[in-house]
Amino acid sequence: MVYSLAPGISYGLSNGRAIVLDLVRDRYRLLSAELSETLARLENGLVAPEPIVASLAREGLISTAPGDRIAPVALERAAESALEIGPQAGRRAPTVFAVSSALLGTRAGLARRSLSQTVTRARACRDQQTNAQDDALAIVVAQKFAAVRAWVPVDRACMLESFSLNRMLVARRVVHDLVFGVRLAPFAAHAWVQTPSHVLSDRVERIAEFVPVFRL
């Protein structure tokens, strides 16, 4: 029998253990070594113990319905941060009004939608665009966003910053990743935006602490 990840399920690996994000239930979970090993066997097409497979299915982690392939989140780690290099000039840099509108609109959306609904909406907006890899423009947008952000009187939160920057990059059709990550000791969850070459919303050393468990 062929299994896929259940809807809303994604995961990363830390020392061989799977850290699961359940978007529907809006929660993180560290799987046991036994469950993690079974996921790995299913990923690689190997025979797995049926009772453990059944347990993963009962808990809503895998499904026989068509879905995403069972595999941990694959992410190319960016080596630099747009916030730690010299200012880049660009004619398509966002205005103060655009940055403020993105932050306020995103804050309103996060307040009335669940995490799952927010991700679904962000994915739909991105899928409607014809995107292109443009790291130079991504850096310009990220730097302008960071510069203007300091003057917008809205409390900072990684979800707000990430979805707001995502919104601005999608509007300019720039390819990028919005990532959720987890640190186990002590536990913390974080979100950031990056391209393959540059982190756009944070410092490189900051996100290095987190295991990616979701990628949009």
Image (tube, rainbow, N blue to C red):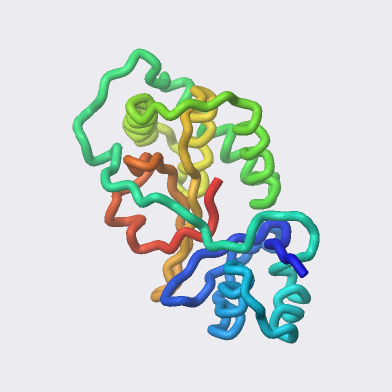
182 on left or right of 125: left
**Depth check: 172 or 191 in front?**
172
**Depth check: 181 or 152 in front?**
181
**Depth check: 154 or 59 in front?**
59
29 on left or right of 6: left
Is residue 148 something one can see in this rendering? no
> Residue 200: image x %, image y %?
37, 40
Picture residue at 44% right of the left edge, 48% below the top: 192
> Residue 45: image x %, image y %?
63, 69
**How many marks overall?**
0
Picture residue at 50% right of the left edge, 36% below the top: 166
Rendered view: 207 above or below 32? above
Rendered view: 197 above or below 93? below
196 on left or right of 127: left
Is residue 52 something one can see in this rendering? yes
Q: Quadrant of the N terminus?
A: bottom right
Rendered view: 51 above or below 43? below
Rendered view: 106 above or below 25? above
Q: Quadrant of residue 194?
A: top left
Picture residue at 48% right of the left edge, 69% below the top: 13
Q: Quadrant of the C terminus?
A: top right
Point out the residue furthest to the left here.
86
> Residue 100: image x %, image y %?
48, 28
Picture residue at 46% right of the left edge, 42% below the top: 161
> Residue 160: image x %, image y %?
51, 44
Point out the residue furthest to the front here.
46
